[in-house]
Amino acid sequence: MHQEVLEYIQKNRDRFLEELLCWLRIPSISTDRQYREEVLNSARYLKEQLAAIGIENIQLIPSEGFPVVYGEKIINPALPTVLIYGHYDVQPPDPLELWNSPPFEPVIKDEKIYARGACDDKGQVYMHIKAVETLLKLNKLPCNVKFFIEGEEEIGSASLPGVLAAHKDLLQCDTILISDTSMVSLEQPSITTSLRGLAYVEVEVTGPNRDLHSGVYGGAIDNPIFRLCKMIASLKDENERITIPGFYDDVKELTLLERRMLAEVPFDYANYLLELDIRATRGESGYTALEQLTIRPTLEVNGIWGGYTGEGSKTVIPSKAYAKISMRLVPYQDSEKITALFKKHFESLAPPSVKVEVRPHHGGNPYISDINSVSYRAAAAAIKQSFGKEPIASREGGSIPILAEFDKVLKKPIVLLGFGLDTDAIHSPNEHYGVKNYFKGIETICLFYYHFAILSRN
Amino acid sequence: MHQEVLEYIQKNRDRFLEELLCWLRIPSISTDRQYREEVLNSARYLKEQLAAIGIENIQLIPSEGFPVVYGEKIINPALPTVLIYGHYDVQPPDPLELWNSPPFEPVIKDEKIYARGACDDKGQVYMHIKAVETLLKLNKLPCNVKFFIEGEEEIGSASLPGVLAAHKDLLQCDTILISDTSMVSLEQPSITTSLRGLAYVEVEVTGPNRDLHSGVYGGAIDNPIFRLCKMIASLKDENERITIPGFYDDVKELTLLERRMLAEVPFDYANYLLELDIRATRGESGYTALEQLTIRPTLEVNGIWGGYTGEGSKTVIPSKAYAKISMRLVPYQDSEKITALFKKHFESLAPPSVKVEVRPHHGGNPYISDINSVSYRAAAAAIKQSFGKEPIASREGGSIPILAEFDKVLKKPIVLLGFGLDTDAIHSPNEHYGVKNYFKGIETICLFYYHFAILSRN
């Protein structure tokens, strides 16, 4: 069966790539209202591609935001069912000027597909469609499959809990399979076993009711930019520990054994610095860089703006200054609780000379996989067969906000079978996805169904 | 003579306004390259207006940047000569959305002229042209006049020292008269006797060589925005005192007598808060608000930007963050010295995890007038005659960077005979200039020539 899969993939290689490139040409930027129609076009393209391989009961499930694309192939109700989750929306591409080729005109260069969404998540979703096509064409699909691909992952999946709750019966399955994460390397495959959660807010500091001349008013008027800087600066102490009262209360410290296991994940610190062109990392004292990146919560300023930002100089004290601030959360922190703690603390930092407003954007809770589940073992067996090497369990720093919700509603194991690499520049200019990763992914997913069907029988 | 002046102004009132509005329609924004041609158009309009009233030897003196408009009327070489300095460029109008009417489509509303440049400085320069027209038409100009109006004041007058040095002979005069400041109120006229200097820099903090995903990289990578906030926040202590080593070394503390004199300037604190819609001021401990605004140096963030600033959210750690920072200086601080101190200190604040670059923009030294000069006394007499009240000596927080240079090259007293009000919103949306201020200004300037000629004879 492995041989047949490889042959089918090889024979259809060019088409498998071309179809993905077509999808990548659609700028489905969910956060920007201007791109609303393109996000819907992305869903429509997905629908057509599912229909083309013989998926049935295809529908655009409406939501309060963008619809969820659903489709299924029920071979036999007695067989185990795999629910595939992913997303058809992408991050904004800016800063545009740093891209070497336009983000929505995909090119293949040095065996990598360059485009916004190449890895996150269109490339990884499309592997699933092509894997199911392969097995259907070979008449070897040993499970039922359900596709459940949303369009709001990059803006926090706000509508998804409602869709999940309303379609709980339709979505019944034995496991949830997701490719929206990365592995250590093609030489050292891995399966992600934990993800961080997210709390994201926007803050606005208001000083005087209008922009003022910094000569006439400077010295007595509190400057909203300076005040915002002071408030932000105070959110972490000199050990880079977050100062929001109660922030760490629910963080479960890892055992020494768990930390030793994590330390086995290859991490080349010198190369890490070199690749990012920095002289040093800087994170919470008392933890390794890898720990800071995966098992510790963070606070990041994702954007800041205020005053005159054009060419040259302007001597102004602006009326307002803004920042976008997000926190990555670890088990067992709660996104809503952390957002509330942030809001209360940040508001308390404002002196009487300014007003402050904290607006929550979106969030999601952290997640840990059960590495003893049938689907996790099936994924490990598939990887061992396709890569020739046992995968290690790794923890990832990113977030898939909706995982906790799947867990709550469907109560089935989730497997994070991702084929990206940390160097794929997702969310950055020049996002890319290895052509080899793409085809290895299709192959591995085919094998997953085989192992999952067998292990489910025992 | 006073009566004739008033009659001539009254008779030509509409034309005096209309000509100014025409000038205000030209968006002469010197800091923005896109407006280069409009800045030149502003100079050309000025040239035509000088020619129209009979000014001679008119020329655009070339400089490394925008030209200086020069013109003169030498009645008799034996008479005293007044050099009028001002500027034909304006500040950028943004944020545009806060203007009630377009910044370059002047309107008169509630007896105020609304437009960018209405007060700073086209409105105040144009008073001089109309005052000289009035005296020439009445055949009553008792002095020689020289107009010297530049186009780079809002970007630091960088080319002006070169022009001054190269045309020292042409510019010989007995006093320099400038209307680019404000007075306390129409009820309490005042003459500005000191101005603050300026040091203006742009800073750039660079972290990783590209924008990164804040989940994948967050926790170990120093975030350039957060680091910039920390660095900026540390520039002032909890007493709002600037922490740059050596910053206050050359600041001359005022004597108690001088502070008492300053305290006599009317300052309605409650109304000040109300008008700006703030609950409290916040400035250096140990000084009154008025002192903080005039006799104490400041550090302001005039602009900040970095990361994602669009709609919605983006989980990014940006590669770079920027800020524009300016410091107002008081006698006897030196702009270049302070810029160097800032640069050294700010660079020293950067940990090894980021790189920092400080780029000086422009600056200018602080200035104090001699209140015993003939021209200061002539200005005081003119104000007393036109306003019916003795002017008080006031100190202003703004800067006219080139004053120190005039002092050095021409070595003649400078009089800051300004008719703006602090509420005129210069450098802000809805800049305006009182119609009454405009006409009172023309009247007072006419009287100045009369008193200056008489006092010079003694």
Image (cartoon, coloured by chain):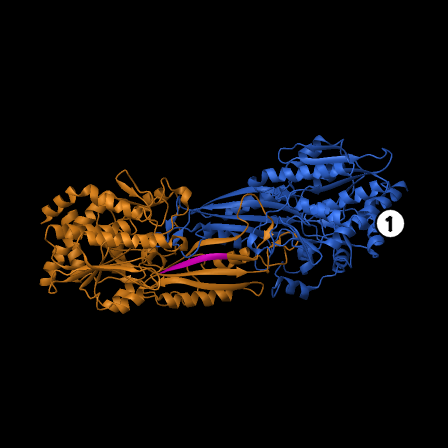
Chain colours: A orange, B blue
Examine the rendered structure and indicate whether residue A69 appears above or below residue B334. below
- Taking the image as shown, residue B418 lies to the left or right of residue B79, namely left
| Front position in the image: B296 or A307 | A307
Count of numbered circles in the view? 1
Q: x, y (%) of residue A422?
A: 30, 48
User: Magenta segment: does it hold B377?
Assistant: no
Q: Residues within 10 Å of mark 1 (few under 14, many from 20)?
A: few
Choose top left, top right, bottom left or bottom right for residue B52: top right
Mark 1, secondary structure of its residue:
helix
| Chain of the residue displaying label 1 | B
Magenta residues (range): A322-328
Q: x, y (%) of residue A458?
A: 9, 63
- Taking the image as shown, residue A212 lies to the left or right of residue A156, namely right
| Front position in the image: A412 or A61 | A61
| Front position in the image: B390 or B437 | B437
Q: x, y (%) of residue A195?
A: 29, 59
Predominant SS of the magenta segment: strand
- The three-letter code of the residue at mark 1 reads His
The residue at which mark 1 appears reads as: B2
The residue at the point 52 percent across, 56 percent down is A321
Q: Is residue A187 visible?
A: no
Q: Is residue B126 visible?
A: yes
